[in-house]
Image (cartoon, grey):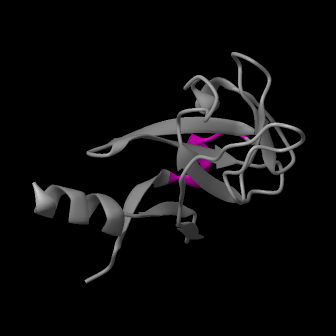
Amino acid sequence: MSDFVDIGHLDDIPPEGARVVKTPLGCIAVFRTSEDEVFALDDRCPHKGGPLSNGIQHGRSVTCPLHNWVISLETGQAEGADEGSVATWAVKVEGGRILLDRSRFSRAVAAE
């Protein structure tokens, strides 16, 4: 059984845009870069919980809309002088479809 779930077509997210996926563990921000790379992070800035999906994406980073913290889309780590991180999620694109690793939220539901 696959641990990935289909969450939509790549074209559902504009280049340098994001969409939110609601899961049992909270909202996940799914980003598409201008190079059609896809990254997934918890949709909460490690600083004050700002919605990263509403931030400005630049390259492989996103700037939180609340206090301008810059977060790496690859690692979830705050960049520059700021410290903190958000969880990243495994994601891949196959046949133009975006697939998100659901193993972590499947385990959380099973533990309840």
Residue nearest the observer in this picture, 110 or 23: 110
Q: Is residue 13 magenta?
A: yes
For the record, the magenta segment spans 9-14
Residue nearest the observer in this picture, 4 or 76: 76
Can you say which quadrant of the picture contains the C terminus? bottom left
| Residue 35 % position (x, y) | 83, 56
Residue 10 is left or right of residue 27, and the answer is: right
Q: Determine the residue positioned at 75% across, 57% down.
A: 36
- The image shows a total of numbered marks equal to 0
Specify the quadrant of the image occupied by residue 50.
top right
Residue 50 is left or right of residue 61, and the answer is: left
Q: Is residue 97 above or below residue 3?
A: above
Q: Determine the residue positioned at 45% across, 61% down.
A: 100
| Residue 42 % position (x, y) | 51, 44
| Residue 95 % position (x, y) | 55, 71
Can you say which quadrant of the picture contains the N terminus? bottom left
Q: Determine the residue positioned at 81% across, 51% down.
A: 60
Residue 49 is left or right of residue 62, and the answer is: left
Q: Is residue 31 above or below residue 97?
A: above
Residue 40 is left or right of residue 79, and the answer is: left
Residue lying at the far bottom in this picture: please name it: 1
Q: Is residue 38 magenta?
A: no
| Residue 99 % position (x, y) | 47, 64
